[in-house]
């Protein structure tokens, strides 16, 4: 059963079309990676899926329900950004609790979920710290924790590791793979790192100028790219 379906999805900014009619069906629990050059529309597409950007034309379906006109809160989707967007004056604990407090969850439920998520992401020792007292990797773990604490059906990542150094990126990549295994939910992940795409994805979607250039399993694309453009992202050494 399709978890997420995009049908002829389009986006215009003023007269300028940046997403040109995307058709894509994503299965429940799939890990999808979007790759493509800067400016090709990856972030815009994610923001449209999240409900942070309006849809100019076409439709978006979640679990067979038309969500095209639904706002972000009703879609059951959480997004993690490249910049961590934590509340600077709030502790890690308060940052994690915030989405649940906004949703008016009971205090004991908030406390137990915060401690579960902290355990999952190795943040237990850091709960009383402020964001500025954390490393980049730790901050990104808090941002991920704040997204998963709402137990979203669909989880979106926009280049979440691109501000981290190489070693931390590798560590976080392994953690994200584990997280996907543990949660089993649908994830869409934007990266320009070929290794991240190859190792994380069930399927890779290569985007170019707001259109899908190729979709397939990592090794299928790697060994059999449709054209030189695709090979430039996944496949032949650059
Ligand atoms: P990517 O994430 O792949 O680098 P983006 O989705 O950020 O690409 O941008 C796709 C295109 O849409 C770019 O040409 C960008 O300038 C344009 N764009 C993005 N957001 C806006 C906006 N709010 N207003 C006008 N143009 C935008
Ligand atoms: Mg982007």
Image (cartoon, helix red, strand yellow):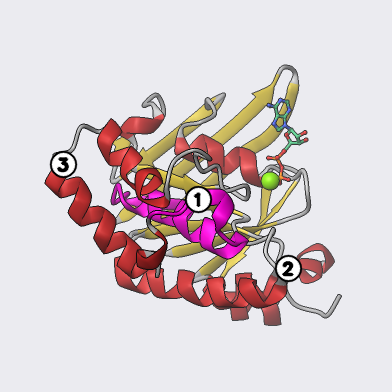
- The single residue placed furthest to the right in the displayed view is 238
Q: Report x, y in % for residue 41.
A: 69, 42
Q: Nearer the viewer, residue 122 or 224?
A: 122
Disc nearer the start of the sequence (2/3): 3
Mark 2 vs 3: CB contact within 8 A: no
Q: Is residue 135 magenta?
A: yes
Q: Is mark 3 within 8 Å of ligand 2?
A: no
- Left or right of residue 101: residue 36: right
Image quarter hosting the N terminus: bottom left
Measured in 3D between alpha carbons, the distance from the residue under mark 2 to the one under mark 3, in whole angstroms, is 53 Å
Q: Is mark 2 within 8 Å of ligand 1?
A: no
Q: Residue at x 76, y 67 (%)?
A: 233
Q: Residues within 10 Å of mark 2 (few under 14, many from 20)?
A: few
Residue holding disc 2: 226
Q: Is residue 52 magenta?
A: no
Residue holding disc 1: 24
Read off the magenta span.
128-156
Disc nearer the start of the sequence (2/1): 1
Task: Classify mark 1: helix, strand or loop.
Answer: strand
Q: Choose mark 2 or mark 3, whichever is in front.
A: 3
Q: Residue at x 62, y 47 (%)?
A: 83
Q: Choose mark 1 or mark 3, whichever is in front.
A: 3
Task: Classify mark 3: helix, strand or loop.
Answer: helix
Q: Choose mark 2 or mark 1, whichever is in front.
A: 1
Above/below status of 139 relative to 14: below
Q: Nearer the viewer, residue 110 or 92?
A: 92
Image quarter hosting the C terminus: bottom right
Q: Report x, y in % for residue 149.
A: 31, 51
Residue holding disc 3: 107
Measured in 3D between alpha carbons, the distance from the residue under mark 2 to the one under mark 1, in whole angstroms, is 18 Å
């Amino acid at each position: 059963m399709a978890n997420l379906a995009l049908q002829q999805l389009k986006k215009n900014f003023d007269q300028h079309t940046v997403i040109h009619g995307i058709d894509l069906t994503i299965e429940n629990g799939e890990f999808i990676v979007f790759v493509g050059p800067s400016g090709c529309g990856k972030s815009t597409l994610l923001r449209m899926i999240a409900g942070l950007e309006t849809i100019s034309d076409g439709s978006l379906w979640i679990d067979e329900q038309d969500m095209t006109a639904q706002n972000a809160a009703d879609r059951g989707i959480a997004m993690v950004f490249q910049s961590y967007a934590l509340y600077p004056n709030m502790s890690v604990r308060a940052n994690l609790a915030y989405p649940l407090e906004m949703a008016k969850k009971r205090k004991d439920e908030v406390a137990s979920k915060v401690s579960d998520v902290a355990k999952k992401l190795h943040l237990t020792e850091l709960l009383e710290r402020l964001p500025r007292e954390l490393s980049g990797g730790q901050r990104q773990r808090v941002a991920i924790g704040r997204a998963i604490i709402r137990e979203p059906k669909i989880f979106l990542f926009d280049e979440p590791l691109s501000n981290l150094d190489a070693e931390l990126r590798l560590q976080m990549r392994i953690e994200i793979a584990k997280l996907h295994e543990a949660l089993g939910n649908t994830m869409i992940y934007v990266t320009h790192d070929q290794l991240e795409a190859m190792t994380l994805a069930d399927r890779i979607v290569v985007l170019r100028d707001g259109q899908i250039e190729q979709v397939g399993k990592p090794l299928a694309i790697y060994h059999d790219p449709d054209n030189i453009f695709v090979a430039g992202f996944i496949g032949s050494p650059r």
